Image: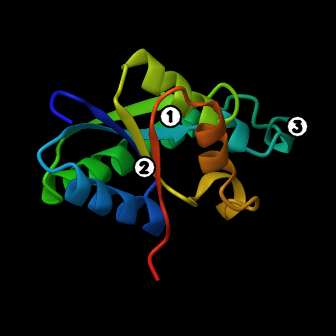
Amino acid sequence: MPDTQLLISYDGSEDAQHAIDRAGALFPSQSALVLTVWSAAALNPSLTWAGMADLQPTFDALRDAAMRAADDGVERAERAGLSARPLVVEAAGPIWHAIVRTADEHDVGVIVMGSRGLSGMKSMLLGSVSSGVVNNAHRPTLVVPPTE
């Protein structure tokens, strides 16, 4: 796949780490964007009712944590033999939608992700993000199964 960029969805979970390792083995020396998506929707809405009207510091902390995760993913990707750079986006809706939209915006060749992650409450719906990407992306998507 010469000159094809990968989009690796990364949230720091073991499955996401494993997906990066497999991407490096399958696509050596490939260029990759390591995408971490954050969402203000993950906050408990009752926080605003509890007197926390100014949530900007909380949003900043979420964005900073996402950037640290993306940077960690880049380090792992480079150790796996990929040429990587971080990308952090805020999801205005479902996480899978932000991944698909980002893949389209960057016209990547392949989306790579683990089958489960840390979205929501430890992904109560097993694989809901990966299912959303697979069912809505208009490009090849590699969902790496968990390690044994």
Identify the mark nearer the N-term, 2 or 1: 2
Residue at mark 2 to residue at mark 1: CA–CA distance: 19 Å
Badge 3 is on which residue? 49
Helix, strand or loop at disc 2? Answer: loop
Amino acid found under the numbered disc labelled 1 = Asp
* Label 2 – label 3 distance at C-alpha: 32 Å
Q: Mark 2 — residue?
A: 10
Q: Nearer the viewer, mark 2 or mark 1?
A: 2
Mark 2 or 3, nearer chain start: 2
Residue plotted at (75% across, 37% down) = 52
Q: Label 3 amino acid?
A: Trp
Q: From the top left corner, tell me how far across and down residue 102 is, in percent.
A: 47, 25
Graded by Cα atoms within 10 Å as few (under 14), some (14 to 19) or many (20 or more), the crowding at tag 3 reads few
Q: Nearer the viewer, mark 2 or mark 3?
A: 2
Give how far apart the Cα atoms at labels 1 and 3 are: 20 Å
Q: Nearer the viewer, residue 114 or 53?
A: 114
Q: How many numbered callouts?
A: 3
Circles 2, 1 touching at the beta carbon (< 8 Å): no
Residue with the mark numbered 1: 60
Q: Residue at x 72, y 43 (%)?
A: 43
Nearer to me, 95 or 136:
136
Q: Quadrant of residue 7?
A: top left
Label 2 crowd (10 A; few <14 / some 14-19 / many >=20): many
